[in-house]
Amino acid sequence: MDLNLADKVMIVTGGASGIGEAIVKRLAEEGAIPVIVDRNRDAAEMLQKALHSNGLKIHLIARELDSSECCQLTVDEILEKAGRIDGLFNNAGTNDSVSLEKGLPEQFVHSLQQNLHHYYFMAQACLPELKRNMGVIINISSKTAVTGQGGTSGYAASKGAQLALTREWAVELLKYGIRVNAIVPSEVMTPQYESWLGQNFDNPQEKRKSIEKRIPLGHRFTTPEEIADTAVFLASPRVGHITGQHIYVDGGYVHLDRALRS
Ligand SMILES: NC(=O)c1ccc[n+]([C@@H]2O[C@H](COP(=O)([O-])OP(=O)(O)OC[C@H]3O[C@@H](n4cnc5c(N)ncnc54)[C@H](O)[C@@H]3O)[C@@H](O)[C@H]2O)c1
């Protein structure tokens, strides 16, 4: 199926690694023009080089997304480079373990800034272009929004807000034909996940196996490519009548019978 994404300019925040990287690759393969926005310049440049060497189009802005001003500057620079914006994948985020019991108020606020604020700032800065091009927004949230995790209040609050904003923006932007949807991943093996396992468990391999056992479909982690395939599909004009949805790409982790986990 042709997803009709050729030459569509699509921003992917956090596009240098993990789920974002997989979205960038899939978009490029579909003939779209992905724009990586990521603070990790080295990783972003490596990915850009790899895609260029395969003859694929891609732009990059190496930047930390930490204020409305820098998000506006990012969008202005993308318009200079690419001339238009058709879609925004809000994806950059870090599970930063700011707990209720031990977290400091300023750490909680910083976590919201790292995980939530730029979702709003980027959407707002892109809006004139999304209106012009009947664009799309895909918000990458997390199961922690609905299940909790424990010990990560700022991240969980951000992920919950992203689901609420998906519905809110879908309603507000109906009049422009802009579709807004969210993906809810649970357990996806990415560099961030690997380092979380390494930092928090004496035996990361054993922990990995115990988590896999609890994932109903196939007893395995979701791959970044499976998240990317769903996200890119949702961005396609072929999916013209889906908006305001929270799509769980999680092998049944959140909703299927708990008895399956034993
Ligand atoms: N991996 C999982 O199991 C999982 C589960 C649920 C949700 N998610 C969500 O998926 C998204 C991607 O996570 P991942 O596992 O691929 O992580 P990752 O660390 O592998 O990749 C995230 C990328 O985002 C960039 N980034 C993060 N914050 C940034 C900021 N403020 N400004 C600029 N760049 C920034 C990082 O440099 C990195 O390249 C996140 O929103 C995360 O919450 C992941």
Image (tube, rainbow, N blue to C red):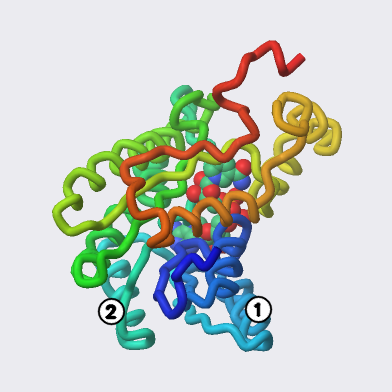
Question: Where does the N terminus fall, quadrant-wise?
Answer: bottom right
Q: CA distance from mark 1 to mark 2?
A: 24 Å
What amino acid type is highlighted by mark number 2? Asp
Give how far across and how far down residue 173 sits, in percent: 19, 52
Q: Nearer the viewer, residue 109 or 150?
A: 150
Choose the circle earlier in sequence order: 1 or 2.
1
Name the residue beneath numbered marker 1. 46
Q: Residues within 10 Å of mark 1 (few under 14, many from 20)?
A: few
Classify residue 153 as left or right of residue 249. Answer: left
Residue 76: which numbered mark, if any? 2
Residue in the image at 48% along x and 78% along y: 60
Q: What is the secondary structure assignment of the residue under circle 2?
A: helix
Q: Residues within 10 Å of mark 2 (few under 14, many from 20)?
A: some
Q: What is the secondary structure assignment of the residue under circle 1?
A: helix
Residue furthest front as drawn: 1
Give how far across and how far down residue 162 sits, in percent: 36, 42
Q: Nearer the viewer, residue 101 or 4?
A: 4
Give how far across and how far down residue 15 sits, in percent: 53, 65
Residue in the image at 61% along x and 61% along y: 22
The answer to whether marks 1 and 2 mark residues whose Cβ atoms lie closer than 8 Å is no
Residue in the image at 53% along x and 69% along y: 27
Q: Tell me if residue 241 can be seen.
A: yes
Question: Where does the C terminus fall, quadrant-wise?
Answer: top right
Q: Nearer the viewer, residue 229 or 187?
A: 229
Residue in the image at 36% along x and 60% along y: 66
Q: Is residue 23 above or below residue 216?
A: below
Give how far across and how far down residue 155 sits, in percent: 45, 39
Q: Is residue 244 above or below residue 7?
A: above
What amino acid type is highlighted by mark number 1? Met
